[in-house]
Image (cartoon, rainbow, N blue to C red):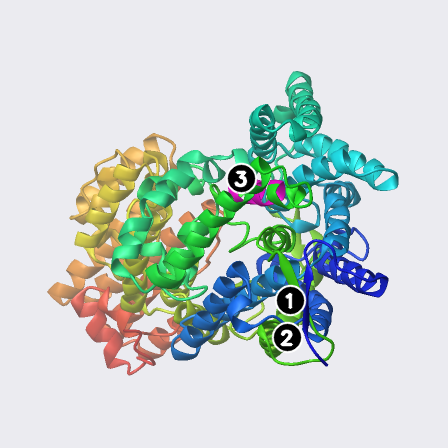
Amino acid sequence: MAAHAEAHPSVGPRERRGEDALRGALLALPALALALPVPGLLEGVPTTDSAAPGWILLLLLPALGLTALTQRASWGRAGLAASVLGLAAVASQLRTLLEAGDPFEAERATVGLWAAAGLVMVGSRLGSAGQQVLFTALASLPLLLALGSLWIGHPAGLAGNAGDAAEAALPAAVLALAVFAQREGAVRVTALASVLAYAGWTAWSEVRVASLGFLAVAGLVTLISVARPAHRALARIALVASLLVAAGLGGRALLGTAQEAAPTASAAEDAPEGGLLFRRLVWATAPALLADHPLGVGPGQLARAYPPYRDPVELESSEHGRTEPTPVDVEHLHMDALNWLAEQGLAVGGALVLLLLLAGVRALRVLLASDAGRTPAALGVLAALATGLVNAPWSQGVLAPAVGLPLLGVLFAPDRLPSRRGFRLGPEGAVLAFALAHATSALAFVRQGASLAGLAGATVQAVGPGGVMETRLDPIPARTAVRAALEATPTSVEALTRSARLGDLSPAEQRGVLERILELRPHRRAALIDLANLEARDGRLERAAALQARARDLDPDSPLLARNALVLALDRGDAGAVEEAVAEVQRLGAGTTADLGSLLTRRLLAGEAAWCGALAEGSGEPLDLQTPVACLDAARRAREAGREAREQALLVAAHAGFAADSAERGDTGGAVRSQRQAARASARGLELLGAPTPSGAELVRLGLAGALALDGQLEEARAELEGLTVTATGVSRLPAPLAEGLLALGVLRSASQ
């Protein structure tokens, strides 16, 4: 069967026009299916950044298959945009095979690139009929997104984040302007409804890029209409629509609902971490990252490689002035060009950036040439490029690739389209083959998202501290959901993190999960902190200190890490480290004098006076903790001040000191009596603080057992140790004579260092 070329935009006979229209409809399928409120493919999915690329690739397969069967261009005429994206996908594939520190993210990025190549390839093969169907379908997207937002009662809609929704809604809304200006009948009515819905949605969501981007494109169309009268009708429509958008924003401001409304996902655009300051600080780190990685960090590896480059000011901004309970990570550089350069390197990434520049030039040329057939595509691409200057709609987007990339294909479509009946491997078939090869991965991303969406059904209301109702996860259905997600994607850091935090794993199991996370993301602060805390609880204090040091290297000004360092220094019994940690806590404002005073009381009750001097100074109440007599005097002053818990804490220090002195003199009976008094004071003080421990703190009990052993009361000493695990760390904190007595019992069961 001979191949022949057909003029663009006409496709020829009626059957070919029907075929072309079907391709256009199939190409719009990914965007429409993801935006539809029902069945809600992304509803409740917390991992939209991976589930959406999976859905897009799978939903694109029919359009790719039809294109491969009915059209075939020569390899030399594959189309600039599709060729660049296809080559980038091949490079990503090869790089992933050679090296992928985070396999899940590497595959997500590669799937995204093949989906992008396919969207552009099919878009570039559409004739006029297919283009009209595509434009009509995409023009309805803002209406669908608005309905989806109403469906779930949140401006983010099904995209999961209002910023991600805006990246798709903006190019579709400006495309709808052109459709309204050019078309008649029901299509025109739908386009108008979509523009009106977009105006209302921008006021509700308050996403700046949605409103400012729309006004900017409208202004550009108005300027171009001065030189091209053919666009004057479009300019008038754009200005009216801009007034609607501005009126919606103004009305919301006048009503004051922006301040009164509860925080939503759209706050990311207005909060410090979503604003210009955040982006400026992130962008400023890109040169250093590129200098260290001229070949790129690898597809999808930004989240793994970027943390050491973060600016301290950006860290504080991203965490709302350190009010976030857990560390906030930066997953990408919030600009398509920088994302591609950083991941793909200066060569491949540079080609993708050049494509973005050429797309902008091409779109402007179409508008200046008054090419009515491609005007909707040009407007949509310009809007998408505008969002790409402040975010990453094509390299990291959710719905945005399914909207903007088909329009990019239309923009770069050749003047004459190839056509051939029957399959023969050309560029269309090659893209289809690669897409099919990644369909399994795409399905895994979809399955993971659906599994984690099940966590919403595992939430229960429970009574927390103080009788406050809290929302928690029921561990049984939650574990089922997380297990299913990990079966689909075993190397997903998101699924592994949720697994570690469910609270139903043994310490050994939790340690294994956290270590796996750190294999995939060595600089993930949350995992470093969680593992350090776990190691500290298990007595592996040196290991905990090393993990904390890694976390502090990434975030030296973290108040949370400063507080953790102080607690660990106290646990280690390192007076010098305690002094340094107290100074850091004070420098960073990580704790008030009252906080330090409360910590001092607890640590004295635990029998740790020997290394609490710096903590006492930091609490604003310098105490002489070096001699038992001074501690007794301080206890008297505390009693006179009505501070019962502090009195008992100082009595522990005093009597433990007397016990050590007695043991040094060989007065073992005196050592036992004093250490018993210390244990009683410890128990009373802990009870006053609401943490009753009838026998006293563990270190105090160890000291009593050591004193009893020295006094020859071996059975009593062993009875005192009931329920305790004697470790090398615990023994090392005791005064030397008491430690020797304890070791003589032969009860040292495990070493923790």
| Disc 2 packing (10 Å; few <14; some 14–19; many ≥20) | some
Q: Nearer the viewer, mark 1 or mark 3?
A: 3
Q: Which residues are magenta?
A: 379-386
Residue at position x 39%, y 79% in the image: 98
Callout 2: helix, strand or loop? Answer: helix
- Disc 1 residue type (three-letter): Leu
Is 179 in front, or is 268? 179
Circles 1 and 2 in contact, beta carbons < 8 Å:
yes
Residue at which label 2 appears? 439
* Extreme residue toward the top, this view: 254
Residue 22 belongs to the span the image colors magenta: no
Q: Which mark is on residue 57? A: 1
Quadrant including the C terminus:
bottom left
- x, y (%) of residue 679? 35, 58
The tag earlier along the polypeptide, 1 or 2, is 1
Name of the residue lying farthest toward the bottom: 746
Q: Residues within 10 Å of mark 1 (few under 14, many from 20)?
A: many
Instruction: Find out whether residue 382 is within the magenta segment.
Output: yes
Q: Which residue is mark 3?
A: 364
Query: Does residue 427 show up?
Result: yes
Q: Would residue 397 be found to the left or right of residue 305 on screen?
A: right
Q: Which one is earlier in the sequence, the residue at label 2 or at label 3?
A: 3
